[in-house]
Image (cartoon, rainbow, N blue to C red):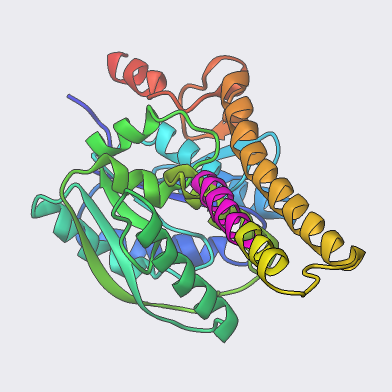
Amino acid sequence: MSNNPVISIVSPIYNEVGNIQTLYGRIHAVMEATGESWELILVNDGSTDGSTEALQALYAQDPIHVRVIHFSRNFGHAVAVTAGMDYSSGHAVILIDADLQDPPEMLPDMIRKWREGYEVVYAVRTKREGESWFKLATASLFYRILYRITDVDIPLDTGDFRLMARQVVDVIDNMNEKHRFLRGMVSWVGFRQTGVEYVRDKRYSGETKYPFRKMLRFAWDGITGFSYLPLQLATYLGFAIAALSGLAILLVVYLRAFTNAEPLEGQATTLVVVLFLGSVQLISLGIIGEYLGRIYNEVRGRPLYIVSNVLGIERVSHAGACTNSTSKRRQEKKNE
């Protein structure tokens, strides 16, 4: 008979020393009230602020529920979440950030929906506290653009805060892309999905890990991971410029044949046209280069992350390195 917990809760940790104990306390109180067996998997994504020592102390405080995975360096939020999913053993997995913007008190509502038969329960933000108008506006714009240009029905105003049944987690574990846009991946796999609404709180302590530069990269990962529109734009621009050129040729012929005008005289006009065409070509090459770079990252076959140490987990894959192929470790554990 399996001793696996019913619920695995995964939280990535990167310089969250001020939030770790509060996160654990709120999750502990909520989960104990549900009566479900549970584990909390905290993935230390190369923290440098004392989070490593805080995680060690938390595991010593509650070795029954707490599991800790230490990365060899920082690999990024999506990769840390993936590692937690790889090492989880629950019948359902809940993803939650450590900044406490997504309240742990929502977990019972998610579990209730899962018990009703839904394989994915995502949290929908009806309001976002403590965020600037610029971030609210750009986030809303991004989700609506993504909804329009992708072939995947990604719910609006959702993040990674969600519950997934074991069969969903196993499918995502087998999806091997390096540039991981998890909310798109979860929507792509299908299954029965539903949402629960909540008000997103302001960050409990510390600083955001997603400044504007990282937000742009995150948005680009989502667009390129689930849409060919950037590549198609190069074709559209080519046809548009060809059409404009054809009209310009007809205009020049008309002016020279039927009027006394001297059309398009001077080097300035020629220079502007050349610069415009050159910029379009460079943008198109840049877009193609982005997709080519992602192909290169995939074919190199490097592990998605490297684990240096674990606490509360019996087995680590060879040399501490683990790709996001499905949990051989989990199967080995079941067979013991």
Specify whether 27 is left or right of 263: left
Specify whether 181 is left or right of 45: left
Q: Nearer the viewer, residue 260 or 58?
A: 260
Q: Nearer the viewer, residue 221 or 254?
A: 254
Q: Nearer the viewer, residue 4 or 162?
A: 162
Q: Is residue 252 above or below residue 296?
A: below
Q: Which quadrant is the C terminus positioned in?
A: top left
Kindly indicate the quadrant of the structure image that contains residue 79: top right
Specify whether 122 is left or right of 313: left
Residue 129: x and y in percent read: 48, 83
Kindly indicate the quadrant of the structure image that contains residue 266: bottom right
Residue 267: x and y in percent read: 91, 63
Picture residue at 77% right of the left edge, 69% below the top: 263
Q: Which residues are magenta?
A: 231-248
Residue 29: x and y in percent read: 34, 65
Question: Is 246 within the magenta?
Answer: yes
Picture residue at 28% right of the left edge, 54% below the top: 153
Residue 150 visible, this orientation: yes
